[in-house]
Amino acid sequence: MGTFEQPERPRFFSGPALLLTLLVVLFGLFSIRLWYLQIYKNEFYLNRAQDNRTRQSTMFSPRGIIRDRDGLLLAENAPAYALALVREDCPDIPGTLDQISIWTETPREEIQKSFELGRQRVKPFDEQVIVSNISFDLVAMLEAKHHDWPGLAIVVRPKRFYTYGSTLAHILGYVARANEEELLNDPSLQLGDDVGKQGIELVLEQKLRGSKGLEEFEVDASGRILSSRVLSQPVKGDDVNLSISLPLQEAATKILENKAAALVVMDAKTGQIVVQVSLPTYDPNDFVVGISHSKWNDLLEDPLHPLQNRPVQSSYPPGSVFKLVVAGLALDSGIMTPSSTIFCSGQYTLGKRSFRCWRRGGHGTVALTKSLVESCDVYYYQVGEKLGVNAISNYAIQCGFGAKTNVELPHERSGNMPTPEWKLKRFGERWQGGETLNFAIGQGYTLATPLQVARFIAALANGGLLLRPTLLLEKADVIGELPMTTGTRKYILDSMVATVENERGTARILRRPGLRIGGKTGTSQVVKLMDKYEKKATKEIPYKYRDHAWMASFVEKDDNCYVVVAMIEHGGGGGAEAGPVVGAMIDLLFPVEVGPKPEVL
């Protein structure tokens, strides 16, 4: 039997040759990789290495200070601590976020949302703010446990503080943490930044904010800081001085205590707002630190709406205050003269409806001055019918009604001066003759804000100039003039003075020796009362059915002239309820001078 012989294997595939070939291939691959890393990607990895050795940190700029007209501090900055996370230094991000939730008593979902929001905006090795405001006790505890929680950092930044809290809440507004939309629309904002949300803080955000600085740190492999240098200094926001007088603002707030009300005191010549009160109010400091869900719900569900800035965001029927406008138009149009009379029997009939005067027995024969002094409704029913709705609406708009004043506050209402076209578009209904009568006495669809009323009274008193009211310590812009002739304007002013000085004047409660004071009361009906409430006293009528009470006035002495307007929601009669408030403010503006004490012999 033959022997099978294996063919001889080529020497190329022998063990040593194969090993040598593999070594050559591996050497070639390593050489190519080395060239790729050290030559081709040299600049990239050099920058990465530099980034690992140096880190940058934002230097936060203090927000501009807000003061009153005399330099008293209203809004300042205090040091605050934020809890931040450096993702690349944190080996257990989920566990760390869990612990942050426990420490700060913040729902885990909110912590996660904050983390997710920032991870797309914060660069590697930068501090990402997770919780904006933490207590000093927590800061001390974290400093003690720093090595147990790598990646956590304490960031010091300025925090807004409102020295007088609720007294100026509706003027100053507040700052709070920037939301997603604000972060998206403003590249200069970082996660955890505070921005103006309401009031002056919102309107003057760019002026007050300032700009951040940048600091660079050199760190070792453990993240310890070896050295630092400032790349750019932070720039503080601009300071702002308001026209508000803090002592008068505090006093006015006490006068209106326990009322739902608005009060405006304006310098008639400059347009500066000296006092602007809206009650009830709230504490803006609650928003700075992050308002709790329970407090927020309490504010939203409060039937008196404390978040509403009544002087600019609430519009009401102006009631008989609007008769000043209609009287001006009646004179300027020639429909009435100062001596023209109308007889008031206590009611006026139009078609099948009777429109009553507030004085049931009527005012008898009424001329123009008496119509304002005693606020006769029947007089204005008939004048309004002669003038027509369109003429009244157009004239009122020229007097500054039906449009925003453009004061430095957000969300201002424009009020409403109705027309037949407006009603048809709004309700799909035709205008009725009786609605013109209601319009003429400031009722029905007629709406005005307290600040609009104050601007109109200021224009009457300052020579006819319609000013843009301002909360800043500067002279307001002139945006127009009253449509009244000089003679008509002076006649209206004199009639307002007579309303205070006359024994039957509805504003006689404002009479003060040594001062020239003019006033006009207004009582605006909320609903048509049921018969069972017709003869009841205000306190016996359910709160929601009571009329709103207005008092609009000006007061002059020497070169000083101020406008004081008060509106009390569901207060009842203007003279009885709003009158004492305005009178108290006049006493504060022009205190009675007390002579020197007699010498003791």
Image (cartoon, rainbow, N blue to C red):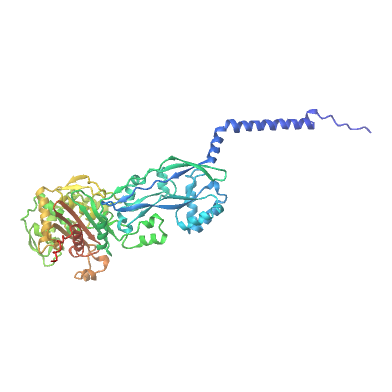
517 lies left or right of 70: left
Which residue is at the far left? 339
Q: Residue sitting at 72 percent across and 32 percent down?
A: 23
Q: Front-most of 514 and 501? A: 514
Please provide percent x and percent y for residue 114: 47, 51
373 lies left or right of 167: left
Q: Is residue 434 visible?
A: no
Q: Residue sitting at 10 percent across and 51 percent down?
A: 490
Q: Is residue 350 above or below residue 1?
A: below
Which residue is at the far front? 601
Q: Residue sitting at 39 percent across and 59 percent down?
A: 296
Please provide percent x and percent y for residue 16: 78, 31
Please provide percent x and percent y for residue 529: 22, 66
Please provide percent x and percent y for residue 322: 17, 56
Res 594 quadrant in image:
bottom left
Q: Is residue 162 visible?
A: yes
The quarter of the image holding the N terminus is top right
Which residue is at the far right? 1
436 lies left or right of 43: left
Q: Is residue 12 above or below residue 493?
A: above
Q: Front-most of 498 and 582? A: 582
The quarter of the image holding the C terminus is bottom left
Res 385 quadrant in image:
bottom left
Number of marks: 0
Q: Front-most of 122 and 89? A: 89
Q: Is residue 349 above or below residue 267?
A: below
18 lies left or right of 401: right
